[in-house]
Image: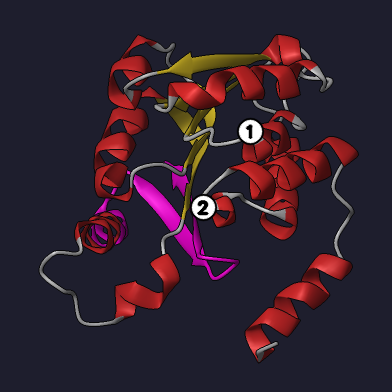
C-alpha cells in the first residue's frame, strides 16, 4: 500500500463503523457492477452521514443514486419528517435500490426518481437543505445551477470527485470531456459570490458548498 492508501485505511479504522446494510450494499456492488469504485465507501459515507446529522435536513436531494450507498448515508440525518429525493438515470438499478431501501429504517423517507436529473430537479420543492452531486461529470455545473436557486440560505451542496483522480492538476487532453467538466465546475465555484466553499481531499475530493 502507498502512503495515501495507508492513511485512508487508518482513518477508516478510527471512524465509526458503517451499518450492516451498507456493508451488504458494498458486497452486492462489487459482485454486480462494472465500476464498483463509484461507491462512496466507508470513510466518505461516514462523512456524508455526519454532515446530514448536523443539518438534520427536511428536504435533501441526491443526484446519482448508483447502488444506494450514499443515499442511505444521507438519510441517516434526516429530520423525522424529512424527505430525500434521489435521482438516477439508469433504470436497471431501480428495483435493487428500492429493495435495499425497503430493508432500511428510512424507506418511507426516500423518494426514488429515474430519469433526467435537470428535468426532475425543476419539479422539486424549493428550500432544499442538503444536496449531493455524484453523477455525470460533464454536467456538474448544469446540476449545480439547477440546484442553487432552490437551496435555502445556509443550505449545503456536496460535490463528489472534484479531484477526479488527480487529473484536475494535469495538462488537459482535448478529448477528456469529464475532466474538462470537473475543472470548469471547480473554477466556477471559486468565483461564485453566492456561496462559500471548501474542497477537502477525502477519497477523490469532496467540495462542501454553502449558499450564503
Q: Position of residue 9 (x, y in %)?
A: 77, 74
Per the rendering, the mark at residue 60 is none
Image quadrant for the C terminus? top left
The quarter of the displayed image where residue 164 is located: bottom left
Q: Going by the image, does 212 lie left or right of 44?
A: left
Residue at horizontal 31%, vertical 45%?
A: 140
Please state the extent of the stretch shown in magenta in the rendering. 186-212
Residue positioned most to the bottom: 3
Instruction: Reply above or below: 132 against 35.
Output: above
Instruction: Reply above or below: 6 against 16.
Output: below
Residue at horizontal 33%, vertical 39%?
A: 144
The total number of labels drawn is 2
Q: Position of residue 141 (x, y in %)?
A: 26, 44
User: Element under label 2?
Assistant: loop
The quarter of the displayed image where residue 49 is located: top right
Label whose residue precedes the other's in the sequence (1 or 2):
2
Asked whether residue 58 is in view, the answer is no
Instruction: Reply above or below: 195 against 52.
Output: below
Mark 1 or 2: in front is 2
Q: Position of residue 149 (x, y in %)?
A: 32, 27
Asked whether residue 64 is in view, the answer is yes
Q: Residues within 10 Å of mark 2 (few under 14, many from 20)?
A: few
Image quadrant for the N terminus? bottom right
Q: Going by the image, does 16 lie left or right of 208?
A: right
Q: Position of residue 167 (x, y in %)?
A: 33, 74
Per the rendering, the mark at residue 68 is 1
Colour scheme shown: secondary structure
User: Element under label 1?
Assistant: loop
Q: Which residue is mark 2?
A: 35
Q: Going by the image, does 70 lie left or right of 170?
A: right
The quarter of the displayed image where residue 146 is located: top left
What is the spatial separation of the Cα atoms under label 1 and label 2, in whole angstroms? Answer: 14 Å
Amino acid at each position: 500500500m502507498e502512503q495515501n492508501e495507508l492513511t485512508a485505511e487508518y482513518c477508516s479504522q478510527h471512524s465509526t463503523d458503517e451499518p450492516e446494510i451498507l456493508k451488504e450494499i458494498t458486497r452486492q456492488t462489487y459482485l454486480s457492477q462494472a465500476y464498483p469504485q463509484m461507491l462512496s465507501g466507508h470513510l466518505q459515507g461516514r462523512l456524508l452521514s455526519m454532515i446530514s446529522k448536523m443539518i438534520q435536513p427536511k428536504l435533501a436531494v441526491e443526484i446519482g443514486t448508483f447502488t444506494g450507498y450514499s443515499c442511505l448515508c444521507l438519510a441517516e440525518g434526516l429530520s423525522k419528517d424529512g424527505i430525500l429525493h434521489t435521482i438516477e438515470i439508469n433504470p436497471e438499478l431501480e428495483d435493487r435500490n428500492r429493495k435495499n431501501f425497503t430493508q432500511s429504517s428510512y424507506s418511507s423517507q426516500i423518494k426514488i426518481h429515474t430519469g433526467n436529473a435537470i428535468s426532475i430537479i425543476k419539479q422539486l420543492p424549493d428550500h432544499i437543505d442538503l444536496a449531493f452531486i455524484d453523477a455525470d461529470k460533464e454536467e456538474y455545473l448544469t446540476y449545480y445551477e439547477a440546484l442553487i436557486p432552490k437551496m435555502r440560505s445556509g443550505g449545503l451542496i456536496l460535490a463528489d470527485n472534484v479531484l477526479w483522480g488527480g487529473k484536475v492538476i494535469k495538462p488537459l487532453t482535448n478529448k477528456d470531456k469529464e475532466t474538462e467538466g470537473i475543472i470548469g465546475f471547480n473554477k466556477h465555484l471559486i468565483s461564485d459570490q453566492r456561496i462559500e466553499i471548501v474542497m477537502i481531499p477525502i477519497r477523490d475530493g469532496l467540495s462542501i458548498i454553502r449558499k450564503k
